[in-house]
Image: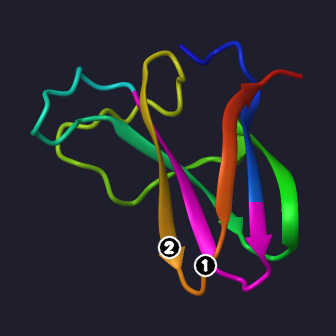
Amino acid sequence: DWRGASGISVAMRGSGKGGILLLEILDDGPPSVPGELDHAERFEVVIRDGCTGWREWRLPFTAFQRRGMQFPGAPADGLTLSAVQGLSLIHHTAPLDVVVDRIGLYRE
């Protein structure tokens, strides 16, 4: 249950090469069974590797958009944050040369 948080904080060292990393939240849906597809609703935000060195990204939940790719059976009730099932970092476009050190929730 992430409803008390404002967003996700990510500490990342970038290379400034311009690649894109997607941060994806898997929200709601029935519990997953190991080895089977989950049925969570997916939301994403884009992180562009546009600077060199360490930076803390604060990604408010309002910046997340529903992904076009959803597995069959996923709910369509919006980003409720009441039953988060997972978080993914997805290499979307090259060149991407980053190091992620810390991921957490933040409150304002």
Residue 37 as seen in the image, left or right of residue 9: left
Which amino acid, by three-letter code, is at mark 2?
A: His
Residue 100 as seen in the image, left or right of residue 68: right
Mark nearest the camera among 1 and 2 is: 1
For the C terminus, give its image quadrant.
Answer: top right
Where 1 sits versus 81, above or below? above
Which amino acid, by three-letter code, is at mark 1?
A: Leu
Q: How many marks?
A: 2
Q: Quadrant of residue 13?
A: bottom right
Q: Secondary structure at mark 2?
A: strand
Question: What crowding class fits label 1: few (fewer than 14 Cα within 10 Å), some (14-19), or many (20 or more)?
Answer: some
Residue at x 23% of width, y 20% of height: 31
Q: 76 or 51, which lies in front?
A: 51
Region of the chain picked out in magenta, as a range:
13-27
User: Residue 96 shows which numbered tag?
Assistant: 1
Where 42 sits versus 54, above or below? above
Describe the colour scheme in one phrase. Answer: rainbow
Residue 87 lies, in percent from the top left, at 48, 40
Q: Secondary structure at mark 1?
A: loop
Residue at x 60% of width, y 18% of height: 2
Q: Which residue is mark 2?
A: 92
Q: Quadrant of residue 81?
A: top right
CB atoms at circles 1 and 2 under 8 Å apart?
yes
Residue 99 lies, in percent from the top left, at 66, 61
Q: Quadrant of residue 83?
A: top left
Question: What crowding class fits label 2: few (fewer than 14 Cα within 10 Å), some (14-19), or many (20 or more)?
Answer: some
Residue 93 as seen in the image, left or right of residue 104: left
Residue 55 drawn in magenta: no
Outermost residue on the left side: it is 35
